[in-house]
Amino acid sequence: GAVVSQHPSRVICKSGTSVKIECRSLDFQATTMFWYRQFPKQSLMLMATSNEGSKATYEQGVEKDKFLINHASLTLSTLTVTSAHPEDSSFYICSAERGGTFVTEAFFGQGTRLTVV
Amino acid sequence: AQSVTQPDIHITVSEGASLELRCNYSYGATPYLFWYVQSPGQGLQLLLKYFSGDTLVQGIKGFEAEFKRSQSSFNLRKPSVHWSDAAEYFCAVEATGGYNKLIFGAGTRLAVHP
């Protein structure tokens, strides 16, 4: 099956610093990746759609200057939380879209728990 | 706008009992519907999906779901629950403008008693 890997799985950072989260499709090429955010005991909220070689498309209410997304290759998308604050603490999950003969399917990474202190 | 409602926040069943998790959606056209399972601190695993055709969909781990257009529902079922099924379950619908851009329900946390 298709594997999507996120790194790191957990990160603690100081308020005001930046944190980069990587999302890699290990055995397939993903022209499109998605970044979600999940608050404790809540559902996943789509933050942005990341397209290889172009700018990400952000959902309404998501600050693009705070959550920088780069999709530099067909197997890697990165989410950088800039000038992190405690309210940015959350579980971030990416998914990568794999194309198929008839239909595509998205595969999720294992998530990254960010804690800002 | 599309939306997904999972009315049950938390469900507890005994091991071996049957299970049904409810999901209702709001979508103008024929939706693409998904059920995912999430273990604590983990990502999501796809259980099953509905695109078209047979309204009863079989998934992994013995789960199935039935699409009922008249009720705007896509309930997840399993005839006999195992202790390892304890997890969070999310129903999702494809969002307009992106095939795998998903809108998730709030989730249902399943606890299984031995």
Image (cartoon, helix red, strand yellow):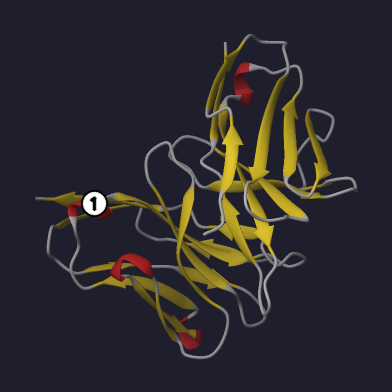
Residue A37 place in picture, x, y as percent: 60, 40
Going 19% across and 58% down the picture, which residue do you hit?
B82
B28 to the left or right of B69: right
Q: Quadrant of residue A73?
A: top right
Residue A86 to residue A70: above or below? above
Image quadrant in which the C terminus of chain A is located: top right
Residue A64 to residue A1: above or below? above
How crowded is the residue under tag 1: few (<14 C-alpha within 10 Å), some, or many (20+)? Answer: few
Which residue is tagged 1? B84
Dot 1: chain letter: B
* Residue farthest along the front direction in this orientation: A27
Judged from the image, the secondary structure of the residue bearing numbered disc 1 is: helix
From where the camera sits, is residue B55 visible? yes
Q: How many marks?
A: 1
Residue B66 place in picture, x, y as percent: 40, 81
* Residue farthest along the left direction in this orientation: B114
* Residue farthest along the bottom direction in this orientation: B53
Residue B53 place in picture, x, y as percent: 53, 90
Going 66% across and 53% down the picture, which residue do you hit?
A96
Residue A106 place in picture, x, y as percent: 61, 59
From where the camera sits, is residue B101 visible? no
Residues A79 and A1: in front is A1
Going 58% across and 41% down the picture, which residue do you hit?
A5
Residue B15 to residue B48: above or below? above
Q: Quadrant of residue B98?
A: bottom right
Give the amino acid at mark 1: Ser
A52 to the left or right of A83: right
Going 43% across and 61% down the picture, which residue do you hit?
B6
Residues A116 and A26: in front is A26
Residues A40 and A29: in front is A29
